[in-house]
Image (cartoon, coloured by chain):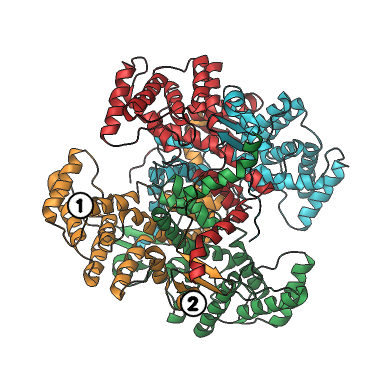
Chain colours: A green, B orange, C red, D cyan
Amino acid sequence: MQRGEVRSDIAWATPSKVVIHGLDLCEDIVGKLDFGQMAFLQIFARLPKDPNELQMFNAMMVILVEHGITPSSLATRMTYCGAPEAVQAAVAAGLLGLGSVFVGSLDNAARMLQEAIPDKANPGDVAMLAQEIVTSFRSRKEIIPGVGHPFHKPLDPRTGALFRVAKQTGYYGPYAELMTEIGAEAERQTKRVLPVNVTAAMAAVASQMGIPWQVCRGLAVAARAVGLVGHVIEEMRRPMADELYLRIEHEASEHLVSKG
Amino acid sequence: MQRGEVRSDIAWATPSKVVIHGLDLCEDIVGKLDFGQMAFLQIFARLPKDPNELQMFNAMMVILVEHGITPSSLATRMTYCGAPEAVQAAVAAGLLGLGSVFVGSLDNAARMLQEAIPDKANPGDVAMLAQEIVTSFRSRKEIIPGVGHPFHKPLDPRTGALFRVAKQTGYYGPYAELMTEIGAEAERQTKRVLPVNVTAAMAAVASQMGIPWQVCRGLAVAARAVGLVGHVIEEMRRPMADELYLRIEHEASEHLVSKG
Amino acid sequence: MQRGEVRSDIAWATPSKVVIHGLDLCEDIVGKLDFGQMAFLQIFARLPKDPNELQMFNAMMVILVEHGITPSSLATRMTYCGAPEAVQAAVAAGLLGLGSVFVGSLDNAARMLQEAIPDKANPGDVAMLAQEIVTSFRSRKEIIPGVGHPFHKPLDPRTGALFRVAKQTGYYGPYAELMTEIGAEAERQTKRVLPVNVTAAMAAVASQMGIPWQVCRGLAVAARAVGLVGHVIEEMRRPMADELYLRIEHEASEHLVSKG
Amino acid sequence: MQRGEVRSDIAWATPSKVVIHGLDLCEDIVGKLDFGQMAFLQIFARLPKDPNELQMFNAMMVILVEHGITPSSLATRMTYCGAPEAVQAAVAAGLLGLGSVFVGSLDNAARMLQEAIPDKANPGDVAMLAQEIVTSFRSRKEIIPGVGHPFHKPLDPRTGALFRVAKQTGYYGPYAELMTEIGAEAERQTKRVLPVNVTAAMAAVASQMGIPWQVCRGLAVAARAVGLVGHVIEEMRRPMADELYLRIEHEASEHLVSKG
């Protein structure tokens, strides 16, 4: 068997020292970096280059933490109810639902933007790009990622909030412009209300920050893990899973019991 | 069936607004709070009361993010290798091993400390408490949580780093003192090198911050989720899982193949 | 670093052959063994010694497959709703809740029985053992594993069914007798209705089959994985997760929206 | 909010009775059905129509149970090493890697076959279909699912074993013929050794049994859950995870430690 290389550049340690991405954990990180800086370091393998880059990153992360009662937070609560000794499993169960339906549009929107503008220094004519993209998705009868929201309409307020920070920090650029054009063009072509939603706004900002689309879902997963811990804590104090599953069991099998 | 209450106080939304723990996501959170503040808000259901509290919390979170190649990060990498389209599953797989062996000592140490000092304003004689605790664990032949480390000895450098921040921010108190005494007493009674390890330091600090021991594992899970995303990203760029499993498969079944 | 042994005795392969627990997959297993025999082989590392042993094992496995709408099957359905492309993650999410609350009583009951009767050839006086066990659990104010059920009372019908098979196949022995006595003694001492429940019946049978208590949860996990696939398939065809989470979201946050 | 229906047809219960897919658990299932029949019942919502159908199903299930040391079984072992108290989490972690790389080819092959032959009573000219399919995949530079294997070549012995059972039981039909033709055509067009592999054989058989391609991954997940329990049991008795992660940690970070 040919022997390949097994190598990680993330961390190393001696008995008296731990080094992470080149920084000494005890000297340079603990007490010096906050959780946002540490998350940035772990994801980009470097510190933020300036306060603007950190602020933009923080804005993306905080917007993802908490989405209320969702299938994901319910999976966490249901799991906690059966295995309260394994908080890690409850959080993991909630993460497992962050797939194509809820978080996938983030990756898909980022991919669409990054494939349309491979080099952000030369974006080309974004209005024309938007027209081509919308026409192409519609001709293939595919959903355009990042436009439309079942609840937040006619505008998704989070898009405005994130783009405001992007303008302040210098990360509002061709990707955000293209995304905005895509939303407008989609509304024109379909004659439906299709706001640029929060995942699209994040995709635009992440693209402007140079984050490859393949990595975007990872950001969402990290942020939601924090959010799901909050749901575990609330479920500890004010449980709902037990009540819910008994109700649902009753309702779902009633038609069978009554036929008996 | 009696109908119980199903209620969450975490978040609510209207089409134009999202509110999390009483703060307007778009007005008060995005662009205003960093990821550490948001994690604090989600876990404590309130903002930090002063910069010291936030700094102490950040120090605890950053120390947990990255532990190098561990069973947990290997589970993440192995899962990514089979299901690269499901980054959420790779992170979840890594979280699942944060159980009794690696993270459990955090909960156990926090529980030991909080049961010994129910009221931090009246800690009593910590030296005497430490003696009772060590004697009691040893008489039951149980492992004392939070003392000893297979690699970081004679001292765990992370304990010193975390306690330094605790002293600066006012969170070095009776729990840290008790933990330190427990370590010293355990070394006296066993005549072995038993440093107060990082999980014990975190348990002491978390107890001083008023975090119930049941919640401690959740902090570790949230921080490690961030760390595991870093491993997914590295595995994308410089994979090791494929090489490893082929090697291990070969080595583990060699004795059977050769008998044929 | 000292180099330990890495060895697995489960399987090996050449390009033209796969061998599992000593049997040739293509010659001896496919078309020859059924799924129950294969599960037995994988768990015991040998084939059943006679039809009775296989029938007893099958009875244990089938009783565990399906429990209707439970927190576990709801976690599966919620996860499928978010990540329909990752059926493996939906099943995994459901398994994660098989912890101390629902399946733990199986391990705990098996442990209680196996510690009380270390050698089934010399069970001693089971009535006296039962009295000691019940008294001891009650004096420690601990729940006696395997007795009582919130819904299946005054008798759990599954206990009778499993014990009938145990009698037919020769696996009704001292462990089942002890478990039955424990139930009766618990009812006497507490004056409450405390049927021997299905997990206790399984614990008794598994103990009689020589299955260590540590392995019992594994049997439950394997059987429930099959059951959860059934829930995924139903959720594909007749979804409930979407409807449920919207309802729950509405109900849980109503008090906040109305104060808004 | 419009109220949708929440309904499950799988199971219902009264205090003295449990009914699963219309069969009384205590009267008709326990002691009557084996684990293979129960898995069939749970997946198809009916009993096998004859012994052939059951034998074919069993053959598919047993072939999937155990694949030796794989990324999936290593994720299980790594998770067990960190959380031995949570066997369910160890099995779940192993399932999570059953994604596009290892099990996805099963779904993809089944989809390819079912889309090519929507009605198995009218398969058309399978040789021509095979030519079209191979040409079409190659023109799109996509991998043809189900042909080729890195280790089992020039033939995958499991394909022959499964197709033998299919011939005996009457499930060798147009899907198996088409799959065989696709393999031969792919070898002709590419001039490479491309055996029809086991996932393709399963896809063909499952299609002939009328199993929709969307459900195929579920079968694999159920069978592998049984297999992973076997790995947990071996890891309990003869652990390898600890040794492995220490070795890998050492090798992966050596280049950083030496630079210091």
Secondary element type, mark 1? helix
Q: Position of residue A174 (x, y in %)?
A: 62, 81
Residue located 81% across and 47% down the image: D116
CB under 8 Å between callouts 1 and 2?
no
Amino acid type, callout 1? Ala
Nearer to the camera, D111 or D184: D111
Residue C213 lies, with reference to residue A200, above or below; the image says: above
When asked about the image quadrant of residue C28, the answer is top right
Q: Position of residue B212 (x, y in %)?
A: 31, 57
Q: Position of residue B140 (x, y in %)?
A: 21, 38
Residue D226 visible within the image: no
Q: Which residue of the protein is positioned furthest toward the front in this rendering?
A: B2
Nearer to the camera, B190 or C191: C191
Residue C124 lies, with reference to residue A210, above or below; the image says: above
Q: Disc 2: which chain?
A: A
Q: Nearer the viewer, mark 1 or mark 2?
A: 1
Q: Residues within 10 Å of mark 1 (few under 14, many from 20)?
A: some
Residue C257 visible within the image: yes
Q: Position of residue B144 (x, y in %)?
A: 23, 46
Residue position marked by numbered label 1 in the rendering: B116
Amino acid type, callout 2? Met
Secondary element type, mark 2? helix
Residue D211 lies, with reference to residue B188, above or below; the image says: above
Query: In the image, are marks 1 and 2 on the same chain?
Result: no
Q: Residues within 10 Å of mark 2 (few under 14, many from 20)?
A: many
Tell me: B117 left or right of A164.
Answer: left
Residue position marked by numbered label 2 in the rendering: A56
